[in-house]
Amino acid sequence: MNHEEIRAKIAEAIAEGEATATAQQLPSEVFAALRERGLALDAAAQGNALPVMDLAVAYRDLINDCYAAGNCFLAAGFERRAKELFAENPEALEAVEIDRQPPRLRQNPFDSSPEWEAILPEVEDKIFLKIGRRQGMGFCHLYWHTKREILLADYGIEWLSPKDLNPHVMFD
């Protein structure tokens, strides 16, 4: 699979509700294709089969595709490899650089709605009445679980937590 095919497969899986851009949920052929592309680029680099700038751009696309597929481990490996390959060539090294913006967390639109603002104090009181005000490691999971239960039971609202919306992120 080439760059466009991988991006299309990721978008298709997400659109069909089969995935949320996490490595565990996307089709395995996407990861096999990413790995295969990486091995092909390594072979091309060793055999000088591509012009240096074309190779740098191909690595950049591969790294971005790995991140888009939710596989940061694979992306980091290819990024390290590209930096080794192009260490002596600043122009190629710059071409490999990817956007270093941290990915934005998906947010529940309900959390910024007027409906939420209207019931927030009441819901917060119910949550803390049920679980107390203790905090610490892992507290957010208990808080979100309780919030989901209360919103569904008392208000008929099916709420998704930040963890539900961002399964690739570790929350504590």
Image (cartoon, rainbow, N blue to C red):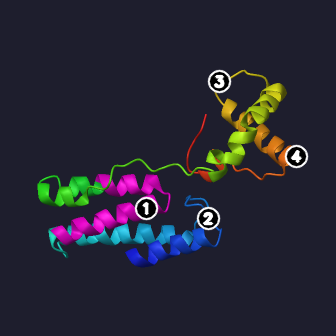
**Residue denoted by label 2:** 19
Q: Which residues are magenta?
A: 53-80
Residue nearest the viewer, comparing 123 with 27: 123
| Outermost residue to the right | 153
**Residue denoted by label 1:** 66
Disc 2 and disc 4 in contact, CB within 8 angstroms: no
Q: Position of residue 55 (x, y in %)?
A: 22, 69
Disc 3 and disc 1 in contact, CB within 8 angstroms: no
Q: CA distance from mark 3 to mark 1?
A: 33 Å
Tell me which amino acid carries mark 4. Ala
**Residue denoted by label 3:** 136
- At a point 65% along the width and 68% down the height, the residue shown is 18
In the rendered image, is residue 111 in sight? yes
Nearer the observer, disc 3 or disc 4? 4
Tell me which amino acid carries mark 1. Cys
**Residue denoted by label 4:** 153
Q: CA distance from mark 3 to mark 4?
A: 26 Å
Q: Position of residue 119 (x, y in %)?
A: 75, 39
Residue nearest the viewer, comparing 111 with 39: 111
The verdict on residue 29 being magenta is: no
Tell me which amino acid carries mark 2. Ala
Dominant secondary structure, magenta: helix
Closer to the chain start, of discs 3 and 1, is 1
In the rendered image, is residue 1 in sight? no
Nearer the observer, disc 3 or disc 1? 3
